[in-house]
Image (cartoon, grey):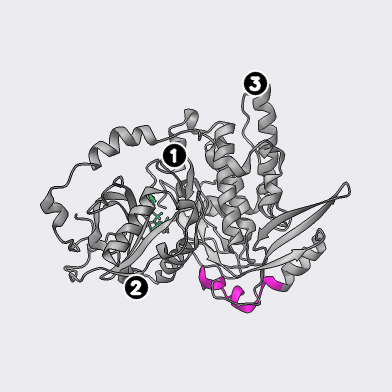
Amino acid sequence: MAAVNRDESDYDSSSSITVPDSSRSWMSNLSFGSHRSSISLCSASETSFYGSQLKPHKANQAAWEAMKRLRRVKGQVGLDHFRLLRRLGSGDLGNVYLCQIRNPVVGLPQCFYAMKVVDREALAIRKKLQRADMEKEILGMLDHPFLPTLYAEFEASHYSCLVMEYCPGGDLYAVRQRQLGKRFNISSAKFYAAEILMALEYLHMMGIVYRDLKPENVLVREDGHIMLSDFDLSFKCDVVPELQRSKPSSEDIDNKFEKYCLTPSCATPMHPVLSCFSSNKKRVSTTTITEHVDGGEINPEMVAEPINARSKSFVGTHEYLAPEVISGQGHGSAVDWWTLGVFLYEMLYGKTPFKGENNEKTLINILKQPLTFPRIRFSSMKEFEETVKVQDLISKLLVKNPKKRIGSLKGSVEIKRHEFFKGVNWALIRSVRPPEVPRDIFKMRDRRVYLQKLSKEERDAPYQIPQHFDYF
Ligand SMILES: Nc1ncnc2c1ncn2[C@@H]1O[C@H](COP(=O)(O)OP(=O)(O)OP(=O)(O)O)[C@@H](O)[C@H]1O
């Protein structure tokens, strides 16, 4: 997702430390069609539809039902079935539009969707097509309340279109700017961190390392709960379930790490993001079930962590890069726990922990500078106690050595057990009232603007791909 005033990088690493040119940014403004005079008016064709797969958590949702009915009636879902209302934002890969189904399904409320439109020709020239394809593949796999649902995907001319859930609450970077002192209070930060932790846990279980956690990529849904977005920097590997009967020693883990981490295809530098994407059975990652003997009782515990998945790509946002990404030594799922630490820090203190005067200094700080926290005044004993706990968690997440970082052995389970999250009802968190619910704003502003009735002519007119995708 496009960041506001935040420098980002997508440099491929070599095995040495690379300090990229601070002026380079991967938020270049791709404007569809601005460089081409015409686009052929071929009809949109649906390449595949993930709706045919089960998305159990969406079973009763109107937006999902409307899409299923559309597919049933039309056979295929394509661009001409949607009305694009406005551009929601743009990123390195494409533009995202707010849209609705052109002829609403009788009996169902008219729903909004977000459509990500990617110009495949332009991306091919920029050698970023594989990223877009990976994002599409990952989105198609997801079925989780805090992750995007891909309702439909199709191609229209040389554009690739992904129809997803629309999040009217903006991103957490923007939400933070509205808070008093541009900082969240501890309980709000805990809520958002807990939901993100659940989303990361699910991704890791699926063998996906997210790699791009930052407030700009955390969108707020209509009900105030979060949705992680933007998977074009993620990497995916095979997850092989494994039953682990005893707690592994750190030596075992180190051995495993050595054994799997640098298989040739994984270690190939200059092959960004996709270096771990191909299915290579040697690059085993694990879904582990451990049994703990605690006071004579065995407490089986599900641990899913692609610990052994490795990539050497230099991707991410400078301030959020983990030390092992910068040093190019190969990284795995522990990078997501590092970014969770940076995220929590930014939520609470309104800045990231290692930011330097420029990108180069930031990277050096990440590698060398010890973690410190700003001094703050406490308004209550409870706030003091909570601060001690959250600072302890952040310190454990921001351990520079990935093998010693919390979460690197048993994944999310270790983090969920931390004192800071004590009392969080993980199973019911999606039913908890979020700190902010954008529904009211949505009702007042967006609905008035976007729920205008279409005339019959408008509804019936066939959709034509505009010369420039921005004009609609
Ligand atoms: N589901 C959504 N609901 C509302 N707005 C969205 C949604 N998805 C994306 N956006 C908006 O569109 C912008 C661009 O989206 P996104 O980050 O997915 O594009 P991208 O090309 O992958 O970006 P990046 O350069 O970060 O890789 C976001 O900043 C956000 O404002």
Dot 3 or dot 1, earlier in sequence? 1
Crowding around mark 2 (Cα neighbors within 10 Å: few <14, some 14 to 19, many 20+) is few
**Magenta region: which residues?**
260-276
> Mark 3 belongs to which amino acid?
Ser
Dot 3 or dot 2, earlier in sequence? 2
Of badges 3 and 1, the one in the foreground is 1
For disc 2, the marked residue is 125
**Label 1 to label 2: alpha-carbon separation:** 39 Å
> Mark 2 belongs to which amino acid?
Ile
Q: Among all residues in the image, which is located at the extreme right?
A: 296
**Helix, strand or loop at disc 2?**
helix
- Dot label at residue 140: none
Q: Among all residues in the image, which is located at the extreme front?
A: 107
Q: Is residue 64 left or right of residue 320?
A: left
Q: In this view, does 197 lie above or below 462?
A: above
**Label 3 to label 1: alpha-carbon separation:** 30 Å
For disc 1, the marked residue is 223
- Residue 324's quadrant in the figure? bottom right
CB under 8 Å between callouts 1 and 2? no
For disc 3, the marked residue is 380
> Mark 1 belongs to which amino acid?
Asp
Q: Is residue 129 visible?
A: yes
Dot 1 or dot 2, earlier in sequence? 2
Q: Among all residues in the image, which is located at the extreme left?
A: 457
